[in-house]
Image (cartoon, rainbow, N blue to C red):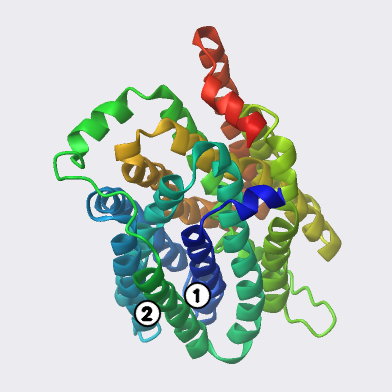
Amino acid sequence: MLADLRALPRAFWVLVIGVFINRFGSFVYPFLTILLSRRGLPLSDVAMVIAGYGTGGLISAVAGGWFADRFGRRNTIVAGTLANAAAVMTLYYAPNLPSLVLLTLCAGVFAGFYQPAAGALVADLIPEERRLAAYAVLRQSANAGFAFGTAAGGFLVSHSAFWLFAGDAITTASYGFIALMLLPHGLRHSSKQARWGEAIARLRSDAGFWALFASQFLCALVFSQFASSYALEITGRHIHFGHLQPEQVFGALIGWNGMLVMLLELPITRITQRFHPRRVMCIGYLLIGLGFASNGFTSTLLGLVIGMTVFTIGEMLSMPMVSTWVAYLAPESMRGRYMGALSTSWNGAGMIGPLIGLSLFGFHPMALWLTCGVWGALSAAIMARSGEKAAEQEEPEAIRLEAVDT
């Protein structure tokens, strides 16, 4: 594993550092539901604001993927991060519901714009046999940043909402300046090569991509509860741990998720790379659903920690494989657009997931947590069925070899 990591190029490690800084400062989104609830907004209004973030990402992910293919990965990251920083800082001053929805939508647009470029740049920089390890490292960096950042955000939200927004804006802008100064452009293509028509025709007939898309959408519905219903569940139970307030307990649970990823994902990846990606993803999706379903059956902090641990194991099994799989499926000239198209599954779920989740939560929390279990099971079933269809034709030998040799 150490030999694989040492072989990764310098530009990749610059990207890793930039992603860590960016994710460390992702203070606002996880705590936005808590902040809006403190203002006295009803759940329906809170859901509308949170959904604006996913809607914005859905709008921009495809455009960001095209921009990354046409004008380079670095330019896309710089433009998106600086604009996102401005939107997040302005959001702090939003005086009413329409402005909250509009600015959250803008923040989602700019955040979704630059995310496909990072995944495409990894595929540009790293040879196929080392991509699984590279994507695992990038995810580890993102989750480590999120773990430490959310824990810090739990204290900020209790003392200073201003610095919650300012810290998010500063770290996001820092990522943009790091990209501007130190990252390569990555692959860029002519306007003819970067047209969406050819990519749409290719995507339309790519059954493997659409199976992955559907599974990721259902899985992302579970993830979308983090910043909405899950935050209300934890704070609503009024759980204290030592001197920690409920908001800080919520931050600590999210931090536990990131800490587990940081410590265990690379060793787990070294084991799972011996198996076919689809099978690993199926198990991961099941555990993701099971982890959140367990929230309905426990009333203790220990039970919540166990549920989060099961969820995180599922995340560590499935998510690195997803990035490797879509990089394999995408032609070199379409990597940004494939990444952008897949991002719409997450952003679409981010748009409707909070609306569904908060509606179910308002009806009865158990209804939501059981539904999360169903979403995880359906994700696994779709990938399993996709594998059966592939086996009837031909298993992708390149992926099997990559899984063994990485």
**Marks 2 & 1, CB-CB < 8 Å contact:** yes
Q: Amino acid at mark 2?
A: Leu
The residue at 65%/28% (across/down) is 279
Question: x and y percent of residue 208 in the render?
Answer: 45, 25
User: Callout 1: 10 Å neighbours few (<14), some, many (20+)?
Assistant: many
- Does residue 238 appear anywhere in the picture? yes
The residue at 33%/76% (across/down) is 87
What secondary structure is marked by label 2? helix
Q: How many marks?
A: 2
The image quarter in which residue 73 lies: bottom left
Residue 28 image label: 1
Question: x and y percent of residue 349 in the render?
Answer: 45, 48
Residue closer to the observer: 374 or 174: 174
Residue closer to the observer: 3 or 215: 3
Question: x and y percent of residue 61 in the render?
Answer: 33, 52
Q: Amino acid at mark 1?
A: Val
In the picture, measured across the screen, residue 404 lies left or right of residue 359, that is right
Residue closer to the observer: 69 or 401: 401
The residue at 38%/34% (across/down) is 330
**Real-space Cα distance between discs 2 and 1?**
10 Å
In the picture, measured across the screen, residue 149 lies left or right of residue 53, that is right
The image quarter in which residue 112 lies: bottom left
Question: x and y percent of residue 191 in the render?
Answer: 14, 45
In the picture, measured across the screen, residue 207 lies left or right of residue 275, that is left
The image quarter in which residue 6 lies: bottom right
Residue on which the image places disc 2: 91
Q: Residue furthest left?
A: 192
The residue at 44%/45% (across/down) is 123
What secondary structure is marked by label 1? helix
- Does residue 364 appear anywhere in the picture? no
